[in-house]
Image (cartoon, rainbow, N blue to C red):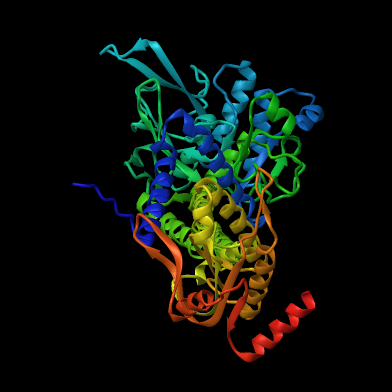
Amino acid sequence: MPITTRKLPRHWSTVLLAAVVATIAVLIWPPERGTALFLAPLHYVEWMGYDALFALRPYNPLAVDPSIVIVGYSAETELSLEKRWPPPRDFHARVVENLVTDGVKRIVFDVSFQDASTPEADKALNDALLKVPNSVILPCTFHRDIAASDTSGVPMKRIVGAYWDDTVDFEQNAKLGFGEIARATAEGTSKHIRSCILANYKQGWDKPDTEGDWVPSLPAATYLAMTEQSTADIRVYPGAVWLGSLRVPRTAPTVVDSFDDSEIPAMYVSFPSAPAPIVAFERVYRNEFSPGTFTNKVVFIGVTGNELAKATNEQFTTAATRFAPYPERNTPYIAGVEVQAQFLSALLRNGFIHQLPLLHFWLIVFVFALAATHAVRQFMNWRGPVFFGVVILIYLSISIIAFQQWQTHLPWVLPSTLVVLTASTLAWMERGSLRKKWSGYVSPAVMQMIMQHEGELGAKRYEATVMFGDIRNFTGFSEKHTPETVVRLLNLHLEKLTKLIYDVGGTIDKFLGDGILAVFGAPLPQQDSAWRAVRAAWLMREAALVPITDEDGNTYTLATGFGITTGPLVAGHVGSQRRHEFTIIGDTVNLASRLQGVTGQPDVIIDMPMNWCAATLRWSHSAR
């Protein structure tokens, strides 16, 4: 039993293609769904598109929470104070005292005080920290000690906080938060910061009286202190992290600590379009600032300035500065303390970037892929590219609006690229199929018109002119010559006629042995179809009377007669799925065949309105 194949209907194949594009987009993004190495370049490109969305935002100098100020220690500070970084701790002590005098609300150090200094400097800083009305936030680091272990023999991940001994304890009026920024890049790169880790699971502490199982990050610890909540109020769930009463969505891919395989939750940050205000460390040290500058402010203290930040490995770019550096700066780099301040601002203002659920992402890409593929399949002329371009622009606009208005990331680079590649390939294949469908029937000029009007073509009724041509006494000629000679001469003869039909803009319906059937005005309507048909017939009659010379030098004359008539007909592709061809059907076709049959001589018989005949005869006489 023969096996038959059935082509998928055109509209269903479009739907299937759009579904495939959407599925591929979902499998590639987000990154945690595709960890294969070959996907890394694709993720990198999409991250560039993510950063570009930040660059499109308008500059807003008030974007950072107004309660945040930075006291920055830069290369200029080193020259002014004649003290290289880090300065003596009694310098920090004076800065703290001046801040307290001005009414500071809270002080956050992005400075490590883990080692001992001189007793005098340590005591001066310790006394200054005790004068701060609210708790100070100090940075800590994780010490992953494989050699050390608890009673069960499990290696410990311990916290190294600020220095303390029998006389000083910097943590007496302080809370701890780890200050790691590079590990906050859950998308797998420390070059461009896009996310912030919120807490890290602890296994053990240097101090046994510390509560809680999670260690907050420096900005998270600051937020908890500002809202009078403790680390015991940190609760981590698969979809969110609760910092007390604040729910922070875990939108970024989860980082896994390689030491103990514990999960480190992270969030994508809506970085502000402007930096936090910076007051030079030396000005605060010398009390050279306006009163009230720090009243009720949260003050971050750390390294700033491009030169010193680079020298101390505290230089970063964020998603907001990669392509759009702050106007007052000439570099996309910002210091680590600025990044920490922006993290806190995000917590205070719910500045979280949300990722679309996969189902919603799939549906959006599917709809736009469906519209784009439908456009290129439905319209082969200029409408197709225009409609396709509009679809892509709408998708990009939705991505930008979702990011700006709702802080939701709709990936646009990979989906748009997939849609463009798919639609371009489909258009190329469709146009190739169309050319194959019409090649051999029409001239290159008519082919170009068909490519531009394919959406308007099809099997339908036309008012067109039919021309039927046939060689006179070809049966007797065939009997006198070998089949090879007959075929060779017939091919040469039909080649001449074909060129003339194409030159005038006609369409060849078919070759019938020694005959040729052509139509003018279908599949593309032509106002002057009758004139074109008569002109082509007259030129072919004259060309047929010119002897044909074969390869042996013998000459032959294949005189041809033509019948022409104008009227209604049906034109289109007729046949089965396995084989079909363009054809014309109707009484007009039959009449043209009969007219050709009564041309006893190589002549042209025309059946059409008298005005067309008169115009044609005038042209034919002038052509002579």
Taking depth in this image into account, of 278 and 239 the one nearest to the observer is: 239
Q: Does residue 109 appear left or right of residue 377 in this picture? A: right
Which residue appears farthest toward the left when viewing the image? 1
Residue 578, quarter of picture? bottom left
Which residue appears at 25% of the width and 13% of the height?
152
- Quadrant that contains the C terminus: bottom right
Taking depth in this image into account, of 386 and 33 the one nearest to the observer is: 386
Residue 176 visible in this rendered orientation of the protein? no
Residue 252, quarter of picture? top left
Taking depth in this image into account, of 621 and 416 the one nearest to the observer is: 621
Which residue appears at 61% of the width and 42% of the height?
299
Taking depth in this image into account, of 274 and 8 the one nearest to the observer is: 8
Vertical relation: 71 (above or below) 16: above
Q: Position of residue 481 (x, y in %)?
A: 53, 50
Q: Position of residue 473 (x, y in %)?
A: 54, 65
Vertical relation: 12 (above or below) 193: below
Vertical relation: 265 (above or below) 444: above
Which residue appears at 50% of the width and 40% of the height?
195
Q: Position of residue 320 (x, y in %)?
A: 61, 46
Q: Does residue 95 appear left or right of residue 34 in this picture? A: right
Q: Position of residue 595 (x, y in %)?
A: 52, 78
State how many labels appear: 0
Which residue appears farthest toward the bottom when viewing the image? 610
Vertical relation: 12 (above or below) 566: above
Which residue appears farthest toward the top when viewing the image? 147
Residue 556, quarter of picture? bottom right
Which residue appears at 77% of the width and 74% of the height?
623
Residue 138 visible in this rendered orientation of the protein? yes
Q: Does residue 10 appear left or right of residue 462 in this picture? A: left
